[in-house]
Image: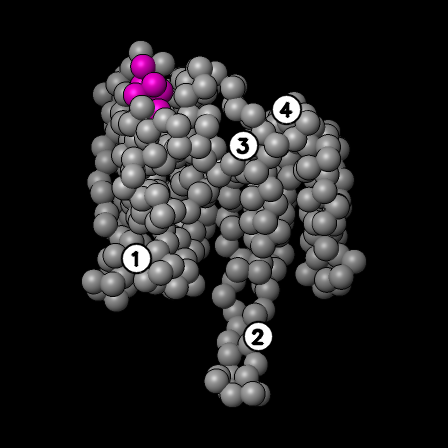
């Protein structure tokens, strides 16, 4: 029997609950499809930081390198550990070390889920550059604590980094409906974003079968709300992609349905899959966290591993569950009840 080794990092707050729920569903799907998933859990989290002074051990990256994929719950406990510490101590190092440069987030309404827009007919795939750009971490602060304090944050855009994420976006558009929206703010950022636009035009000549349109980020944000059905694949830098995908989560019914994948496209290292929502400390351990985004992320993991039938089965089970209005109203159904309904729909 084929088996995949999965690193499980439940993290903080509701991350533990939704990871356990997703794992239950994924193991069921694997059994039905004739393969096995072997999970190894790691306690790396803000609690781990408070105990050890690190978000993960020094050899954490090398420990993860041997796994086929990583399933992450949520990281963050802002009342105890600053978000800048938790993010730069765990999530960003994993993305960068494993060259997970493509962050993929699907935005569409599941059956039975009502979004805030007048239209329901949209299916947007957002591709966010994941390892450089505005989140490169280049910069510093001087004269701290004085009236002359200065903070500098430098965005880094490399030709290799911009070209590979745009090429990834073109390939995704080619496999879907043949439309690509490239997002910048080149009217205001005349170096990095003009550079991005130039590479977009260069690659467009190679992908004559894809219709590419360049948008300023503010115009694209408005389009996601006013005419989301006009969009297919959206590709953007780290910061712009981060913001736009929160709009995507909102129009698909909320963060409880927002899945994501951090992909290493050449598969030279493991990819990581995670729901977009945070750790939600205020509802942690109440048993009401919606696990659908985590389960959807798990389906994306199965698809990446090559188990497309199992991934499709999980998505059909999710749709069957939400079509029955289970998991569609915040707080109405418990985490366990939603999980059980998805498992039942799989069998």
Instruction: Pinpoint residue 255: horizontal percent, then vertical percent.
Output: 48, 39
Q: Which numbered circle lies on residue 120?
A: 4
First reached walking from the N terminus: tag 3 or tag 1: 1
Residue 266: in sight, yes or no? no
| Percent of width and height locating residue 41 | 22, 43
Q: Which mark, by number, is residue 152?
A: 2
Q: Quadrant of the N terminus?
A: top left
Spatial distance from mark 3 to mark 1, Cα to Cα? 28 Å
Label 4 to label 2, Cα distance in Å?
42 Å
User: Which mark, by number, is residue 46?
Assistant: 1
Q: Earlier in the sequence, mark 2 or mark 1?
A: 1
Which residue is tagged 3?
Answer: 253
- Is residue 9 depicted above or below 317 in this figure? below
Magenta-span inclusion, residue 326: no
Quarter placement of the C terminus: top left
Mark in the foreground, 3 or 1: 3
| Mark 1 closeness class: few <14, some 14–19, many ≥20 residues within 10 Å | many
Magenta range: 338-344
Task: Give the quarter of the image for residue 298.
Answer: top left
Q: CA distance from mark 2 to mark 3?
A: 36 Å
Quadrant of the image occupied by residue 314: top left
């Amino acid at each position: 029997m084929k088996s995949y080794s999965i690193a499980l990092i439940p993290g903080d707050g509701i991350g533990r609950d939704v990871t356990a729920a997703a794992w239950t569903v994924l193991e069921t799907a694997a059994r039905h499809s004739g393969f096995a998933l072997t999970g190894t859990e790691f306690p790396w989290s803000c609690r781990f930081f408070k105990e050890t002074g690190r978000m993960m051990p020094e050899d954490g990256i090398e420990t993860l390198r041997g796994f086929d994929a990583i399933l992450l719950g949520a990281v963050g406990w802002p009342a105890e550990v600053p978000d800048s510490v938790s993010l730069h101590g765990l999530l960003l190092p994993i993305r960068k070390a494993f060259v997970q440069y493509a962050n993929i987030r699907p935005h569409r309404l599941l059956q039975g889920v009502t979004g805030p827009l007048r239209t329901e007919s949209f299916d947007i795939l957002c591709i966010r550059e994941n390892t450089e750009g505005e989140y490169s971490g280049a910069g510093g602060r001087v004269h701290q604590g004085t009236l002359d304090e200065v903070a500098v944050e430098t965005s880094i855009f490399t030709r290799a980094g911009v070209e590979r994420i745009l090429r990834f976006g073109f390939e995704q558009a080619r496999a879907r409906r043949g439309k690509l929206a490239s997002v910048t703010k080149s009217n205001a950022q005349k170096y990095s974003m003009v550079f991005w636009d130039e590479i977009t035009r260069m690659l467009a000549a190679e992908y004559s079968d894809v219709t590419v349109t360049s948008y300023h980020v503010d115009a694209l944000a408005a389009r996601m709300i006013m005419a989301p059905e006009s969009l297919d694949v959206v590709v953007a830098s780290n910061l712009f992609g981060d913001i736009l995908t929160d709009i995507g989560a909102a129009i698909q019914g909320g963060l409880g349905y927002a899945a994501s994948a951090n992909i290493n496209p050449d598969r030279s290292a493991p990819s990581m899959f995670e729901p977009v929502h945070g750790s939600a400390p205020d509802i942690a351990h109440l048993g009401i966290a919606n696990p659908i985004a985590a389960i959807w992320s798990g389906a994306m993991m199965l698809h990446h591993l090559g188990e497309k039938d199992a991934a499709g089965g999980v998505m059909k089970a999710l749709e069957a569950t939400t079509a029955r209005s289970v998991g569609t109203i915040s707080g109405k159904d418990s985490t366990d009840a939603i999980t059980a309904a998805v498992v039942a729909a799989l069998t």
